[in-house]
Amino acid sequence: MTGKSYFFIGIGGIGMSAIARYFLAEGAHVGGYDRIRSKGSIALEEAGAEIIYEDKPELIPDRYRSPREVQVVYTPAIHEDNHIRQYYAQHGYEEVKRAVVLGQITRRQKALCVAGTHGKTTTSTLLAHLLDQSHIGTNAFLGGVSQNSGSNLYLNPNSPYVVIEADEYDRSFHQLTPTHTIITSTEPDHLDIYRTAEAYREAFQVFAEKTKEGGIILLNEEAQLKESPKGVTLLRYGGTPGLDYWYSDVTYRDGELYFDWHYPDGCYQQLQIGTPVEINVLNATAALALAQHLGVTEEETRQALKSFLGSRRRFERWLNEPHHPVMIDDYAHHPDEIRASLTSIRKLYPDKEIAVVFQPHLFSRTADFMEQFAEALSVVDNVILIPIYPAREEPVPGITSDALAKLVTSPLKASVTKEGLIQELRKHHFDVLVMMGAGDIEYLLPEVRDYLKSIVL
């Protein structure tokens, strides 16, 4: 790829940035556009990428203005009325979605694809860590930044495997050709794209059938496929005894989490996981199964699992100091994710008062799951909502954080602007604060942490 040029529209996105870093490592010229200069885009600049932050075609560097030499990669998150997208479309450039490029890259290796409504980022990141810390090694394109590696990209020229977080949005995962597959969940989401729950689950069926002959599919016990794809082995995992892979005896000791992991011929007893939340035991059950299938040993498994730090914005502790509230950041944005995360946090801190600040993501998702969001958030006693993050959408009449707050049944609840958040927090008493959502809530984290440091419990 040395000498080739790629221009990424939406380069700062987590999936786009991984591919951009891959091309940079291969010696290609990489340019791009994004709306904000984030930590991810700054890291890309430091690695050699040329990035612009204004939607003005005249700012595109000369290197990325030759239709014969430049491939344009875009994400649907950047709307088609974007001026830079329009410029490239009107001047005859080759334009492809991120998913197409990822599919091209991954067909060169043995692809280990992790898909699902929720759990896929943690599961794929853990699988990559297990392989990376073993004698097998791995490449990986992840949907989150690994806290262990500090990146969403693993590169290992000596490994035949590549771990891929398979994104179901816009049916992107249909571009992939898995050697082996994990499906963590098929609960409906993205109904702005799929319209019906049946169409959403059908997309997972199509994805599963792309698994190569002779491969395995690890399917969560609560996930659904209409039928087992031909030529592959379908295996179930979860927390129910008798499944192909299952867990039991989850225990907390001195703030750490241990569990037993069962496989067809035996059991690894009292494994310790470095991210001590119970939902990650389920994710680990799948990752451990595929890692063992590929030859990772028990000793390698124990050491890697214990050292696993998780992904950025997935149960990431921002403050965990004596005499101050604990602060946790979590990317959860689907009702099932929210319920699982808050329930796990409740178990980790059984005698503590917990508050959550939640930013709903997308008007369409909020409208589709309004009652489910309210029920999931009501797991804790303090619920504070900030305005919906619109991403690519226009507002929907009647769909607001105020409307969602009215459905929440927690004793203490509020809906405030982002600017009014700190003032609202002063009205609440809590030992643990969870900042939750997939939008721009992450930019509030430093200010909130500074405020919590002023509180002495």
Image: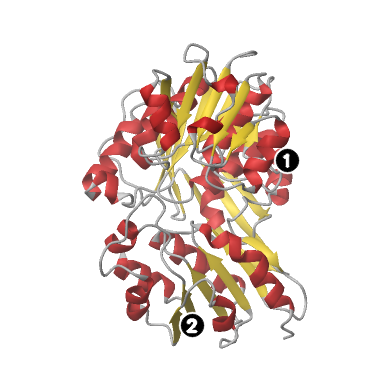
Nearer to me, 384 or 315: 384
Q: In the image, which disc is placed on residue 199? A: none
Between 70 and 157, which is closer to the camera in this rendering?
70
Taking 9 as reference, is 82 left or right?
left
Left or right placement of residue 185 versus residue 112 in this view: left
Residue placed most toward the observer, 21 or 341: 21
Q: Residue 275 location, x and y as percent?
A: 65, 57
Which residue is most to the right?
322
User: What is the number of the mark on residue 381?
Assistant: 2
Determine if residue 277 is in view: no
Q: What element carries label 1?
A: helix
Residue located 43% across and 49% down the image = 242
Label 1, on which residue?
A: 299
Instruction: Sort mark 1 into few (<14), some (14-19) or many (20+) by Cα contacts within 10 Å.
Output: few
- Which quadrant holds residue 116? top left
| Element type at mark 2 | loop
Name the quarter where the N terminus is drawn. Answer: top right
Residue 221 at x, y = what percent?
39, 49
Tell me which corner region of the image, top left, top right, bottom left or bottom right, holds residue 26. top right
Measure the alpha-carbon separation of dots 2 and 1: 42 Å
- Amino acid beneath label 2: Asp
Is 250 above or below relative to 200?
below
The location of residue 23, given as percent across then percent down, is: 61, 24
Is the residue marked by circle 2 packed among few (<14), some (14-19), or many (20+) residues within 10 Å?
some
Please name the residue shown 42% across and 25% down the image. 88
Residue beneath the point at 51% across and 64% down: 341
Q: Quick check: can you spot residue 366?
A: yes
From the viewer's perspective, is residue 205 above or below residue 1? below
